[in-house]
Structure formats: structure tokens, C-alpha cells
Amino acid sequence: GVAPGDHKIRDLPFQPGKLKALSAAMLTSHHTNNYGGAVKNLNKVELELAKITKDTPGFQVAALRERELTYTNSMILHEQYFGNLGGDGKLSGVIEKRLGGQFGSAARWEELFRVTGMSLGGGSGWVILDLNFATGDLRIYGTSGHSQSVAFGEPLLVLDMFEHAYAMDYGAAHAKYIDAFFQNVHWGEVEKRLARGDKALQALRT
């Protein structure tokens, strides 16, 4: 486990200058300021939570718990987002077959994933392809915040649609950012997550 207040910022799993159509400046800023900020704030919140007692006002406890969940999910989702970048964007293998079987074709899945991202453009949120442990299948979720991801699942592919993920390079042109994202997906990492999720799902059902 991780002691309260002791979460560490993980390095980018790729060289930021090597990605296609996403600048090193934007990726570095995103990683340092947004992801790094979430980790630092989570540490601070956890240390404050360690100080609460039965006499702490309820509104203070509720506010800290809300921030704890927001920063926790921001940390996790950012790590998943950066972790599924750095590839060549070429979909193949088991994950392609699973997407095709689930959505009719991989192209149909991509259409649904992209349009979900487009629906969040100009605002904030995440698009997540999850292995839903409650239903046992793959689902696309779109969320406007950090604390609305599926409660019981394995995130397989994560797309950050907060403006900080693309505005430095693309301004308000979020469609171009989504195109750039797909050029850099590390499908091998997504497939690894699917295998891990399948294993967990099997264990849950025995």
C-alpha cells in the first residue's frame, strides 16, 4: 500500500518529443501541472484527512472526501492516459477482435468512442473504454468530471478531454486532438490491461 500523503509522481512512459502531432511542450505541461498537481493535492488532502476526529465539522469532512475522490481519480486516469500513449496507433490482435465482437466492428467502436470525445469538446471530462466487471463486457463511458468513472471495472483506453490536454496545440479544435490521440495509441498496453481485466473477472466469477 501507499502511506497517506506518500503518492509519487510517475515519469512519462514515453519520450514526449517522439509523439506524432502532440507537442513535447503540451505533454510536459500536462504531466507536470495537471497530473503532478493532482498527486500533490491528493497527498495534502490525505494528510488533512488523517487529522479529522469525531469533532471535525461534517462539512469539512465531506469537502475533504470529495477532494480525495477527485484527486485520486485524476491521478489514476492521468496515469492510464499517459500509459496508453506512445504507440503507433495501429489496432490489431486480441483487442481488435474483442472490439469487433462487442460493437459489430472495430470501426463502429472507434466511431462511438470518437463521438463521445467530441461531445465533451470545449468543456471537460474523460472518455474511457472499460471492461465492466458487473456486466462482463466492454463499455464506453463519457464523463464530465474526475469522480464519475464506472465503479467496478478495468479502464482499458483513456482519453483526456479536459482542455489542458489539447488547447496549447489545437486551441478549440478538439477534433484534431482526437485524431492525434488515435495516431499515438499504444494498443499493446491496452491489450495488457484487457488480459489483466479478464483474469480479474474470471477470479471474481469463481
Image: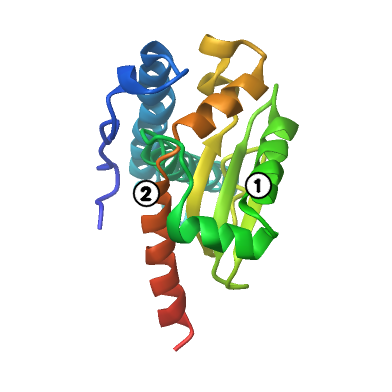
Where disc 1 sits, the SS reads helix
Question: Please, is residue 115 above or below residue 95 in the view?
Answer: above
Residue underneath mark 2: 189
Q: Point out residue 35 in the picture as x, y percentages from the top left corner.
A: 40, 30
Residue closest to the eye, 176 or 167: 176
Res. 52 in view = no
Type of amino acid at the residue the image marks with label 2: Glu
Question: Please, is residue 141 above or below residue 67 in the view?
Answer: below
Question: Please, is residue 161 above or below residue 77 in the view?
Answer: above
Name the residue: 25% across, 52% down.
2
Q: Point out residue 82 in the picture as x, y percentages from the top left corner.
A: 39, 35
Where disc 2 sits, the SS reads helix
Type of amino acid at the residue the image marks with label 1: Ala
Residue underneath mark 1: 107
Q: Residues within 10 Å of mark 2 (few under 14, many from 20)?
A: some
Q: Which quadrant of the view contains residue 79?
A: top left
Q: Where, quadrant-wise, is the N terminus in this rendering?
A: bottom left
Q: Where, quadrant-wise, is the C terminus in this rendering?
A: bottom left
